[in-house]
Image (spheres, helix red, strand yellow):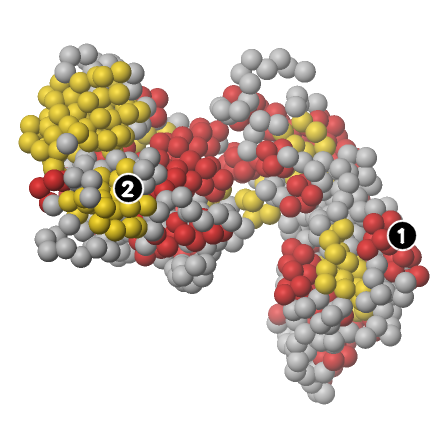
Amino acid sequence: MRRVYLDNNATTPVLPEVLEAMRPYFGEHYGNASSIHHHGQETRAAVERARETVAALLGCRASEVVFTSGGTEADNLAIFGMARHGDHVITSTIEHHAVLKACKHLEAQGCEVTYIPVDGRGLVDPADVKRALRPHTKLITIMFANNETGVLEPVAEISKIAAEANIYFHTDAVQAAGKIPSHVDRIGCDLLTISGHKLHGPQGVGALYVRKGTKLEPMLYGGSHERSRRAGTENVPGIVGLGKAAELALAGFKRGADLRMDDLRIDDQLDDQKIAAARDRLERELLAIEATGLNGEGAPRVPNTTNIYFDGIEGEALVIALDLKGLAVSTGAACSSGAIEPSHVLIAMGLRPERAKASIRFSLGKQNTTEDVDFALGLIPETVARLRELSPVWPKSAVSA
Amino acid sequence: MAHTDTIAVAMSGGVDSSAVAAMLRAEGRNVIGLTMQLWNQRRLAGHEGMPESVRGRCCSIDDVYDARRVAETLGIPYYVVNHEERFERDVVRPFVEEYLAGRTPIPCSLCNNHLKFDQLLIVARQIGADKVATGHYAQVVFDEQVDRWLLKRPADKSKDQTYFLFGLTQEQLSRTLFPLGGMTKPEVRELARYHNLVIAEKPDSQEICFVPGGDYKRFLEAYLSEQGSTPTDVAGEMVTTDGKVIGEHAGVHNFTVGQRKGLGVATGSPLYVIQINNDTRQVVVGKDDQLYSRSVRTRRVNLISTAELGEPKRVAVKIRHKHLPAPALIESTGPDEVQVTFDEPQRAITPGQAAVFYDGDIVVGGGWIENSGQ
């Protein structure tokens, strides 16, 4: 069965160049990067090269990059590394759980947290952030791009508010890095999270940018790895993979993207601009189906994501029906059993629960082709029609729009 | 025999539904495994004296894990579908309300009617399945003579689950498969072993899936406190059958007809709950022989083997899951209402339970017990 993957905000396939770059570090280059001998020096050099390319992607110094086990750890490190008992933290209602649940835990530890709401487009109003400031506010953490809708938050404006008030600003840029330029000075943040597997790098590796001079308490204690900000032997293959993925993402931005996968030499394979065009076409044609709508309409978004509601269906059933036909998309956030819960992001945007549950996220990656979009467009309208026909809540006599 | 139809199997992670998936797969059918996430077992854990641990419970992560392992072993697609909202609305709340109204509910029947053979069937059809198969011990056959789908007792009478299935409509039965209907439990386990299913030796579950340890009173209290309400107007008097007040009780939900333990009154001879009067909040107690009655009024009746009852009909009637069907006459007394008159008085006929009518192995239908005549 042909399978098409349009769930690149969940994870992306590792690009062949990335895999190639990593391969020696599973084999002949096995040294511990902290060792003084030849083997250690080899892997130390690889880790530091990767740090430089990640720094280049983020427009920062290599010494400001702390490698972690992924986006969640980087978010947690930023939050728990900054906030102490009695501090006040400002975040938003649409953050990823890696931030939201960390903030909930802060509250249990005696911190005060303000959750800034979003408008119907999914945007935080910087004025709300300003109004939430308190004398003891320590940290503002607001995401750059939302994982479910792709909506870009006004992080540059928020960072100005933070700077004026002399407060640290962290942004979870997991869904932005690699998709749009994410320079720390343009954003104006003190801390920024990225994740390897969201930009065609491997799973299990991420990084936290920590602006020079930011006093961050570590979460893990042990050796003096990562300048004593994150103890633990470096995940060398992962870090090398993240470095390569960062390099390719950067090259994509610089050259208007001309990346090719060796095993998929299809002429119309999507580059960065084409991703945006393909997403726009997918979105336009899906919105032509009756009783649908765009979540995040009117807000700036990353170029690869579209989140659409199909009234009268359960998103869960649509995801399953499409998967059985070879198309991988997603809805909401999966809970531990794998069942789907209504998205806190869409609910925060004011969608009624039925509409939130009728929403599907489509997210494209560099490996996708225009034929992938054709395949999706060939399947979705008929599948939505079938679901609606069998839905107890869809009016059978509905006149098509 | 070659089949080309697609069957969704309701997989709980237990032996029975896993064996069903294995059987249908072995027959060459397209099988999709579905597990319904119905209740968050962690929701009330540690609440109001509820157990902290929820291991081995229905809808627990362990069961989903087991079902997923089985699906992987069989090479079938598998998904978990979330029906927590509907389950709470259609099963848990009615369960709580029934107890607070002095009745003894059967959540499994409600779950079958509103979830397994309704919501799950809808999802199954939406994702391309024609029918739903479950691990229930029952049989469904189409009778061309009467042009109806019939529900019948299974080969293994000791596992008979037809009592919980009396509410199924013709439409639901037409899209249902009970592949274990002709098998015994040991055969089912043997089949699971044959297919190398990890759950082959998993113990049977007996209790209500969302009530840990079977302690429904604790569950009620934990649920009500979570909802921010306490059962305030459920306390009342304890009276004898001749109206003498012999004590007080803290709530009608603590009692079920036929109950002997925990009445909180001491008398010479053993006392049983004879009746729970919802209007006056009185719990009527009396001697064992006062528990017997011959007639039962049932409501919200569903008929299966026939569209209408017509003339009064001689059947055998089961008034609780473990009750031996007793000979009785049933007659229609109104829309969806049937009067049951037993040949011999039956002990502890309990409002809230179901009365299911059998003609031999065939389920004629059934209804919810409203009250019993003395």
Q: Residues within 10 Å of mark 1 (few under 14, many from 20)?
A: some
Res. A293 visible in picture: yes
Q: Residue at x 26, y 16 (%)?
A: B334
Q: Amino acid at mark 2?
A: Gln
Q: Nearer the viewer, residue A217 or B341?
A: B341
Residue A140, by quadrant, is bottom right
Image disc number at residue A157: 1
- Which of the pair B151/B112 is nearer the observer? B112
Task: Please state the horizontal and vertical placement of residue A341, each as a whole percent of the image.
Answer: 56, 44
In the image, what residue type sits under mark 1? Glu
**Image spot of residue B173 (x, y percent):** 31, 26
**Element type where label 1 sits in the image:** helix
- Dividing the image into 4 quarters, which one contains the C terminus of chain A? top right
Locate residue A119 relative to residue A167 in the image: left or right: left
Q: Which mark is residue B282?
A: 2
How many numbered circles does the render carry?
Answer: 2
